[in-house]
Image (cartoon, rainbow, N blue to C red):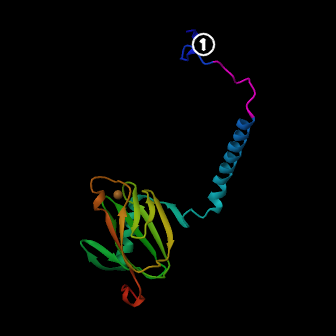
């Protein structure tokens, strides 16, 4: 057996790169390259035209300032309490402040169907995942950022917020509540 019959790191394979490529190989390279260009163009195009970016506003915020803002929101529109968590019914068009923290969603919300709100989301400590069940609406909740999402509840019912970003030992206990009511008359809160 001569040294050229097997390949190893010590004996490199015989080079053929200087031989012309087959026509079919060239065709496939051309197709692959064209597809690369399409994908490359889609990245910026989809960013602006794809409509997959959340239609919201974003601010930097210190976690403590956000907590203070949530407390003010709770004090303004609180209508009740359940297992130590205040139930808050903001008026139509209001800014709604929801806080994710280890390990609860605070406060519980009482909203009206077909009414505009700006839902603010932020965290007091680590990353959490806002996941509204059973509608499967998901959003990242990040400390230091206030994400304001313009929302119009289109279905009445009793919804749960689950945390879908693992955040420690009590992660599975992190279940919040959103109540969407049909009639404005039954929503309670301030006139
Ligand atoms: Cu969590």
Is 52 left or right of 154, judged from the image as shown?
A: right
Is 91 left or right of 11, judged from the image as shown?
A: left
Tell me if mark 1 has few (under 14), some (14-19) or many (20+) residues whose alpha carbon lies within 10 angstroms of its own: few
Q: In which quarter of the image is the C terminus?
A: bottom left
Q: Quadrant of the N terminus?
A: top right
Q: Give how far across and how far down residue 60 sits, in percent.
A: 49, 59
Which picture quadrant has residue 11?
top right
Q: Is residue 31 magenta?
A: no
Identify the residue at horizontal 57%, vertical 62% (top origin).
52
Q: Which residue lies furthest to the top in this view?
A: 2
Residue 65 visible? The answer is no
Q: Which residue lies furthest to the front in this view?
A: 1
Q: Residue furthest left?
A: 83
Closer-to-camera residue (72/11): 11
Q: Give how far across and how far down residue 112 sits, in percent.
A: 43, 82
Dominant secondary structure of the magenta stretch? loop
Q: Relative to 173, is 14 above or below? A: above
- Residue that numbered label 1 is attached to: 4
Residue 53 visible? The answer is yes
Residues drawn in magenta: 14-22
Closer-to-camera residue (187/40): 40
């Amino acid at each position: 057996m001569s040294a050229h019959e097997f390949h190893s790191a010590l004996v490199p394979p015989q080079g053929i790169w200087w031989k012309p490529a087959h026509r079919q190989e060239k065709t496939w390279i051309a197709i692959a390259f064209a597809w690369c260009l399409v994908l490359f163009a889609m990245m910026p195009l989809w960013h602006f035209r794809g409509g997959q970016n959340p239609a919201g506003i974003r601010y930097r915020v210190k976690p403590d300032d956000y907590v203070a803002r949530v407390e003010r929101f709770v004090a303004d529109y609180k209508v009740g309490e359940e297992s130590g968590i205040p139930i808050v019914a903001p008026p139509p068009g209001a800014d709604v402040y929801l806080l994710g923290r280890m390990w609860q969603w605070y406060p519980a919300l009482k909203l009206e169907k077909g009414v505009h709100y700006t839902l603010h989301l932020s965290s007091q400590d680590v990353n959490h995942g806002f996941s509204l069940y059973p509608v499967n609406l998901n959003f990242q909740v990040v400390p230091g950022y206030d994400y304001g999402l313009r929302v119009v509840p289109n279905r009445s019912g009793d919804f749960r917020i689950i945390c879908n970003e693992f955040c420690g030992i009590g992660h599975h206990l992190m279940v919040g509540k959103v109540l969407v009511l049909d009639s404005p008359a039954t929503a309670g809160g301030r006139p």
